[in-house]
Image (cartoon, helix red, strand yellow):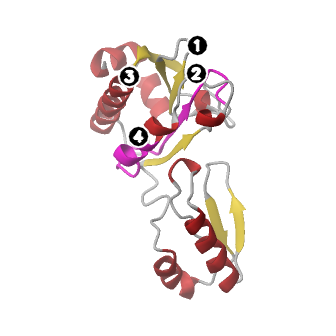
């Protein structure tokens, strides 16, 4: 199976049609994933390179130890939204997707505190408060060993959010252990030390 990169889960009609046509041509299965991507499965290994050429799209994950995903809610179209979040979601995708790190990092961006895309359980969550100001939570984790997020910073504008995340990822890259997830890094270093170092 292969998974093309679909920034923020937003895809053009042309690319959606292209994925459908390729899947039909190679008798593939299609799965819309929880990470806002489309997985194209049931492929023959010898067809993979040709399929990538026909899609003319990059892979969703180039290196597992990197920012593997930036999920973006549909806040611009939601009545609960306090901030038009799609723009900053795409900025974060362009700036950080694929950068190599000690472990994999998932980012989610939500236009309100409801966080329908589970921003509280991602490595980094960017959300809008009731006042329309942005805040950042870090270290959230679901699964078998869940972890509650830590509040990193609040009352932010887009420029401040991007700068703080840039600082955080740089600090993590410099000080994280091999294959250490961000949540484990926060537990080892301490959230106060991280706040002092990145804000």
Residue located beneath label 2 in the image: 82
Q: Which residues are magenta?
A: 90-115
**In the figure, 49 relative to 88: above or below?**
below
List the residue tagged with mark 3: 189
Where does label 4 land, which residue? 92
Q: Is residue 155 above or below residue 149?
A: above
Q: Nearer the viewer, mark 4 or mark 1?
A: 1
Disc nearer the start of the sequence (3/2): 2
Q: CA distance from mark 4 to mark 3?
A: 25 Å
Q: Earlier in the sequence, mark 2 or mark 4?
A: 2
SS at mark 1 in the image:
loop
Tell me the mark number nearer the camera, choosing from 4 and 3: 4
Left or right: 87 as drawn, with respect to 167? right
Find the distance from the CA under tag 4 to the CA under tag 1: 22 Å
How far is mark 2 from mark 1, CA to CA?
A: 6 Å
Measured in 3D between alpha carbons, the distance from the residue under mark 1 to the one under mark 3, in whole angstroms, is 31 Å
State yes or no: discs 2 and 1 in contact (Cβ < 8 Å): yes
Q: Which residue is mark 1?
A: 130
């Amino acid at each position: 199976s292969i998974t093309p990169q679909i920034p923020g889960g937003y895809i053009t009609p042309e690319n959606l049609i292209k994925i459908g046509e390729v899947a039909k041509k190679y008798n593939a299965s299609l799965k819309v994933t929880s990470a806002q991507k489309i997985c194209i499965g049931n492929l023959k290994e010898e067809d993979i390179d040709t399929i990538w050429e026909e899609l003319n799209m990059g892979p969703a994950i180039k290196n597992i130890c990197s920012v593997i995903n930036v999920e973006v809610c549909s806040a611009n179209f939601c009545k609960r939204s306090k901030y038009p979040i799609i723009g900053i979601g795409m900025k974060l995708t362009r700036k950080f997707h694929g950068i190599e790190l000690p472990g994999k990092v998932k980012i989610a961006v939500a236009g309100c505190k409801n966080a329908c895309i589970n921003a509280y359980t991602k490595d980094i969550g960017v959300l809008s408060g009731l006042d329309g100001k942005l805040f950042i939570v870090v270290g959230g984790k679901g699964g078998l060993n869940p972890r509650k997020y830590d509040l990193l910073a609040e009352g932010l504008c887009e420029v401040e959010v991007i700068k703080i995340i840039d600082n955080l990822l740089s600090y993590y890259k410099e000080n994280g252990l091999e294959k250490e997830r961000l949540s484990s890094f926060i537990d080892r270093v301490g959230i106060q030390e991280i706040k002092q170092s990145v804000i």
